Image: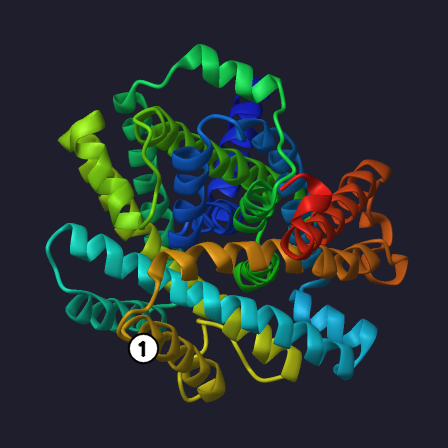
Amino acid sequence: MKLIGRRLKSRWASLLLLFAIIGPGIITANVDNDAGGITTYSLAGGNFGYKLLWEFIPVTIALVIIQEMCARMGAVTGKGLSDLIRERFGLRITFWVVMGVLFGNITTTMAEFAGVASASEIFGVSRYIAVPLAGILVWFIVLKWNYRTVEKVFLVACTVYFSYVISGFLAKPDWHAVGRAIVVPSMSWDGSTIMMVIGIVGTTIAPWMQFYQQSAVVDKGIRAKDYKLCVIDVVVGCFAAVIVCFFIVATCAATIHQAGQRVETIDQAAQALFPLAGRYCATLFAFGLLNASLFAASILPLTTTYLVCEGIGWERGVNHSFREAPEFYSLYALIIVLGGGLVLLPHMPLLQVMYISQVLQGILLPLLLIFILILVNDPRIMGEYRNRRFHNVVSITTVVIMIALTLLLTVAMIWPRLLGG
């Protein structure tokens, strides 16, 4: 009996520890289903149908591997990704890495506020009211609350993403066609298809996610001894995020594409669902977009701020007060104002901003992965926790494929006839 009691206590202790560690992996993976992501997946389903669903299998594998590597580096070293890049490669290289990701992040922050604008107008609220209110809300959340409180709010927000799963079933897709598209890859080599493939990778495995994942692990105080439970957090988060992505594509493929329509604006995607799949499906889609936009509008500026502060060496973290880390909070506010303000400019092409920002993330991804691979394979940094062969094979394959796709996209744009475009 005593042995059984000890085992039960041990299991309960492990379960409680898992709940204490859960957060960074789930939040990081799901926040990437942001306005830019929803736009990209809506375009993929609405304009290409079920054709590109096969891509989610290799993308899921790569997402889990890459997120796990960054979580492991954070747990083992207790340092953020920018810190490690600066220490290993020097300030000059760190500066260019920071500038590249910063540019991509600012365009993606614009995409989040573009999502707020689009979602609010679906519900009849002017963007000139919704966007400033959203900016104030996300700044207040991060400024006034500590990490654990912020994390709880973000975890609750993650659950709202399953409104897209419900929308997917309401749309009644052709499950036979869905199954065939998953197992039988289909690929055209024209510029628009190549760009969409890059965009799906870029929005599912965005470079900024790696910085946030590692910084969140460090901020939460997760160490190497808790590493195995941290992996569960990463895997659960990645699979939950990809399921949501899958249903967004399937929803738009079963409605907009099947009706012979195309996605021209993100609010048109939601509005089109009214006659094609019912009012509840469209409302859930729009509600999910608003939640995703607010969620990511909090995380992306935060990630960018971590990135810059780590790279320069400034104090950072939501556990610090404004007096302790004035640069951190000032930069966070500046990015929010810049991202939200640019969206309010007249005639701003919101859908193009959201989509192109994700393609840019896909182009930047292999460059960052090269730095991550060097760091995570360095025995002086990682010791016994350095990469295994499988992790390296998946990551190097991802780098090669993404560089090749970027070159093909360049060729398709300059000499379309060479690829039959």
Query: Can the viewer see residue 1?
Result: no
**Residue 113, x across and y down, in percent:** 32, 64
Query: Which one is nearer the viewer's eye here, 85 or 5?
Result: 85
Residue 388 in the figure: left or right of residue 115: right
Give the vertical position of 200 relative to 207 (above or below).
above
Amino acid carrying label 1: it is Gly
Query: Which one is nearer the viewer's eye here, 197 or 393?
Result: 197
**Residue 197, x across and y down, in percent:** 59, 42
Q: Residue at x 83, y 59 (%)?
A: 374
Give the vertical position of 212 relative to 279 (above or below).
below
**Residue 119, x across and y down, in percent:** 23, 53
Secondary element at image label 1: helix
Which image quadrant is residue 252 in? top left
Which image quadrant is residue 215 in? bottom right
Query: Can the viewer see residue 201?
Result: yes
Query: Which one is nearer the viewer's eye here, 254 or 191?
Result: 191
Q: Quadrant of the C terminus?
A: top right
- For disc 1, the marked residue is 341
Q: Residue at x 35, y 63 (%)?
A: 349
